[in-house]
Image (tube, rainbow, N blue to C red):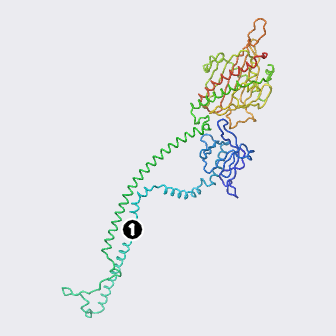
Amino acid sequence: MSEKSSSSGSDEDVDPESGQPLELGGILSKWTNYIHGWQDRWVVLKNNTLSYYKSEDEREYGCRGSLCLSKAVITPHEFDECRFDISVNDSVWYLRAEDPEHRLQWIESIELHRAESGYGSETSLRRHGSMLSLTSAASALSATSTSSFKKGHRLREKLAEMETFRDILCRQVDTLQKYFDSCADAVSKDEFQRDRVEEEEDDFPATARSDSEYNHNNNGSKEKLYPPASPKGMNGIDFKGEAITFKATTAGILSTLSHCIELMVKREDSWQKRLDKELEKRRRVEDAYKSAVNELKKKSHYGGPDYEEGPNSLINEDEFFDAVEAALDRQDKIEEQCQTEKVRIPRLTPIPPGDAYSAVSKHRYATKVEEMVQNHMTYSLQDVGGDANWQLVIEEGEMKVYRREVEENGIVLDPLKATHAVKGVTGHEVCHYFWDTAVRFDWETTIENFNVVETLSDNAVIVYQTHKRVWPASQRDVLYLSAIRKILATNENDPDTWLVCNFSVDHEKAAPTNRCVRAKINVAMICQTMVSPPEGDKEISRDNILCKITYVANVNPGGWAPASVLRAVARREYPKFLKRFTSYVQDKTAWKPILF
């Protein structure tokens, strides 16, 4: 993936002049729809916006779509290490990077742009928090009903009474404190005066004083008279009245507190009931929301990548099977219409003589081709009638289809073997039309694109082809070497054998892509021509020839799909393929000279 810059959330990812994150651009695979699947797109991350173009060269024509990342939700896929989804409200982009490292780089860059836009960081949360608090408080105040204020009216009155009582009580406390301070000062002065008088009596005789300074007791003794203590301000305080008022004030406070507590308990019960009702409403709304989201996913995103084939697909096996069967039925109807409307263009494809295919070719895959040919001649022609591992699944006239159930890591790898007998054609003709790429589209209806990657020799080519997608299965492509050979009989009484073998190879011009799942194949079409002697001196005609066909196929689908679906599709499609192809060969050769 080519990129203009890399972003990982560090200071190096920020422009030192503007303080903004750097622009990031590169190729990502974007899910388009269930027909075209994953497509490579040029994606640009700039100024908190994610945009995509068909290619880097088409940027000048404008983007094909964009997302503002301020409120985007980035979700790395749980199972696919290269995929991540970006959703903004109802819009969802499914994206895939070329490897987990690039996925992480894109996610971190997107998060950095979101943080710099004022969403997601702690400072932004604090910055928006006060405004949210004011807004929510204002909305809560405006949403409060008039009845709620009426209910709280008495409580506010009681609280106002508490404020009044508090002021009165504070003033009374100050007054009483002044009184007590004055009393304390008066007692201190009185004691000081007594001590001073006693000291004076010790210094001067008592006879010098008049009798008016003494108080005469009944027993004839005399007691010194002292002036009563009179603290400053003390005569202006009604101590008894202040005490009564203090008692009344405290009683009023206690009564008001009791009443407030009673009101708050009632209000608490009322609010608890309202809270319970709101919680119940919220629960119902959440249930309705979840149900609506599930329905929305089924309707609006049905056909997205999460519904594709795979062990974690959101579609169950029955729905998968129904969808595949419906798609195949539609393809069959389309093909029938095309066949009735199509005017077949005669192709001038002369069939080379058989001797041209009997020699071993010289190319870099020659040894591999010979190995495949020998294996098919040894094992594919063996009779399967007595082998318990092979199950007869289809029998229609001369055609029989066998299957052997094989699974590896949960993937169905069932080998298939079909035998058939077709009148009026030779093995050479059948194998030629099966191998000839010039007529491939005339009889093969499952192919979407087809091209020869490399011609190795006159009888060997490397072919790349993509097959029509059958949703919800992923689209498949195949890269294989196709070789045609004539195997001369070792016994003069046995017929020669014609063989076409197709097996998967690798090639730098057709590397695997994210768009298709690469399947692996090992297929062989093996034919022998049987000739019945004509009557009398008549020449051999097509009525006297019969082609025995053995077709074997070992296919690794390259991805996961329900075993029942794969086996059902194989059982349905292979007999149709053999009938369609052999009918095509019969029509093609009906008026041509017989080519052995």
In the depicted view, which residue is nearer to us: 392 or 130?
Answer: 130
Q: Amino acid at mark 1?
A: Thr
**Which quadrant: the C terminus?**
top right
- Identify the element where label 1 is drawn: helix
Residue 379 is at least partly visible in this image: no
Residue 373 placement (x, y as % from top left): 73, 23
The residue that label 1 is drawn on is: 164
Residue 257 placement (x, y as % from top left): 36, 62
**Which quadrant: the N terminus?**
top right
Q: Is residue 271 above or below residue 483?
A: below
In the depicted view, which residue is nearer to us: 174 or 411?
Answer: 174
In the depicted view, which residue is nearer to us: 57 or 116?
Answer: 57
Extreme residue in the top direction? 536
Q: Is residue 410 above or below residue 205?
A: above
- Image quarter for residue 102? top right
Residue 245 placement (x, y as % from top left): 33, 71
Residue 542 is at least partly visible in this image: yes
